[in-house]
């Protein structure tokens, strides 16, 4: 018997404006195109045999809230048959495109978690990123969500931005904390080739400055009662992202919509980013068959991102072999260098190793 995925990601490609750093699948919002895309999403869902007992649903983008409240209602209605026992139902929100009508739609369909694109509270950095919200807009969005009892709210912030100073970062993090989110995700800027930042020749900050910012973030958020449970993610009161933990624990998941990826039964698939091509044929996927060796390495690569590390008995159950037997030399050498810690239940990075995870993973590739 093949187990069906218990996690679903759906990608909404529409944006009212395009952020300067974004390389995700996105297209300018047009009402007719969005309607045609919704028709296609319905076809895509109907031609699959999805698990009706999903644990998590995550709607990302793009900008899901670029849809009108009527369109958003239509989209979530399509997912209702699969959301009956969902534990965590997340939607990404741009505070530039959110209002009470959309909040009511989320409540109606059982959405219980929101991830808001905060990025920075510095107006010059927001302008450079082509973001048009203010700190007040974020606050108003959180109030609308809390009015409909959605109080599990994550804020995304970025650091290592061009021209960003340490003081700017401190101010943004403290402004975010004053809004009392339950979760924070802090990402260092990566300059992707097909972005406005790349075309303008922008660079992220130098490695030493970026490392200093990261260390300050970890230290400050710990002081404020946030637990770091993954390299870029911090939660209060154990409000970890269940959906993202599925990725890090190397679980299978559905991907729906152009620009989405999924992993099912030893295959990873990527749905092309071209919205019009997707509307013509939602079944087109780029499929990669993952060899067992690939899967084991990917499980290590994802699992070591977690503070608790890789659960040894789960790895054994997943692959029928001990993690230590697969990578004896890498694990021995990295324990000796005090970059990894092995106990009865987990293999994890030491605090020192956590900061050089990419280097550690090279040892597993060897």
Image (cartoon, rainbow, N blue to C red):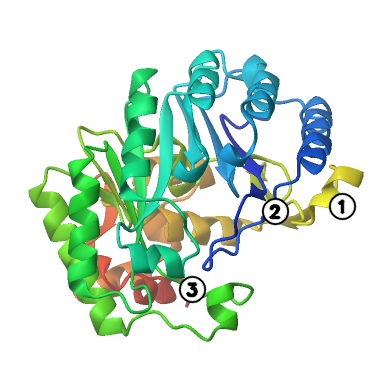
Q: Position of residue 15 (x, y in %)?
A: 62, 50
The quadrant of the picture occupied by the N terminus is top right
Q: Nearer the viewer, mark 3 or mark 1?
A: 1
Between 54 and 188, the one nearer to me in the picture: 188
- In the rendered image of this protein, does residue 216 appear above or below residue 366? above
Identify the mark at residue 28; answer none if there is no mark: 2
Q: CA distance from mark 3 to mark 1?
A: 36 Å
**Marks 3 and 1 in Cβ contact (< 8 Å):** no
Q: Position of residue 333 (x, y in %)?
A: 28, 75
Residue that carries the numbered disc 1 in the rendered image: 277
Q: CA distance from mark 3 to mark 2?
A: 40 Å
- The residue lying at 34 percent from left, 81 percent from top is 205
Q: Position of residue 113 (x, y in %)?
A: 41, 30
Check disc 1: other Cα within 10 Å, few if <14, some if 14-19, many if 20+. few
Q: CA distance from mark 2 to mark 1?
A: 16 Å
In the rendered structure, the answer to whether residue 19 lies left or right of residue 303 reads right
Check disc 2: other Cα within 10 Å, few if <14, some if 14-19, many if 20+. some
| Res. 232 visible in picture | yes
Q: Say which element carries label 2.
A: strand
Identify the mark at residue 365; answer none if there is no mark: 3
Counting labels gives 3
Q: Earlier in the sequence, mark 3 or mark 1?
A: 1
Q: Say which element carries label 1.
A: helix
Q: Nearer the viewer, mark 3 or mark 2?
A: 2
Q: Position of residue 179 (x, y in %)?
A: 23, 40
- In the rendered image of this protein, does residue 259 appear above or below residue 183? below
Q: Quarter-wise, where is residue 327 in the image? A: bottom left
Q: Earlier in the sequence, mark 3 or mark 2?
A: 2
- In the rendered image of this protein, does residue 236 appear above or below residue 266? above
């Amino acid at each position: 018997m093949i187990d069906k995925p218990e996690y679903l990601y759906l990608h909404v490609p529409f944006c009212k404006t395009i952020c300067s750093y974004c390389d995700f699948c996105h297209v300018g919002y047009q009402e007719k195109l969005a309607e045609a895309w919704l028709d296609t999403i319905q076809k895509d869902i109907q031609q699959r045999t999805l698990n009706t007992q999903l644990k998590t649903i995550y709607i990302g983008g793009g900008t899901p809230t670029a849809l009108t409240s009527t369109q958003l209602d239509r989209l979530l209605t399509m997912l209702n048959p699969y959301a009956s026992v969902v534990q965590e139902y997340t939607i990404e929100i741009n505070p530039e495109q959110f209002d009470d009508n959309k909040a009511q739609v989320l409540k109606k369909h059982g959405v219980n978690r929101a991830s808001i694109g905060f990025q920075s509270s510095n107006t010059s950095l927001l302008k450079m990123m082509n973001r048009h919200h203010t700190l007040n807009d974020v606050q108003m969005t959180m109030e609308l969500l809390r009015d409909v009892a959605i109080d599990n709210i994550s804020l995304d912030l970025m650091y290592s931005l061009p021209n960003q100073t340490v003081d700017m970062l401190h101010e943004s993090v403290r402004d975010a904390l004053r809004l009392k989110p339950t979760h924070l995700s802090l990402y260092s800027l990566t300059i992707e080739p097909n972005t406005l930042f790349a075309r303008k020749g922008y660079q992220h900050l130098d490695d030493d400055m970026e490392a200093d910012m990261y260390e300050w973030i970890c230290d400050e958020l710990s002081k404020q009662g946030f637990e770091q449970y993954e390299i870029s993610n911090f939660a209060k009161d154990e409000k970890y992202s269940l959906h993202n933990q599925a990725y890090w624990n190397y679980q299978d998941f559905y991907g729906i919509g152009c620009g989405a990826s999924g992993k099912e039964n030893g295959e990873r698939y990527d749905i092309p980013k071209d919205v019009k091509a997707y509307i013509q044929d939602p079944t087109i996927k780029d499929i990669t068959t993952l060899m067992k060796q690939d899967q084991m390495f990917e499980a290590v690569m994802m699992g070591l991102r977690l503070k608790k590390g890789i659960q040894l008995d789960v790895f054994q159950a997943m692959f029928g072999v001990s993690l230590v037997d697969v990578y004896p030399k890498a694990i021995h050498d990295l324990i000796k260098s005090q970059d990894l810690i092995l106990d009865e239940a987990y293999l994890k990075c030491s605090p020192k190793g956590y900061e050089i995870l990419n280097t550690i993973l090279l040892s597993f590739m060897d």
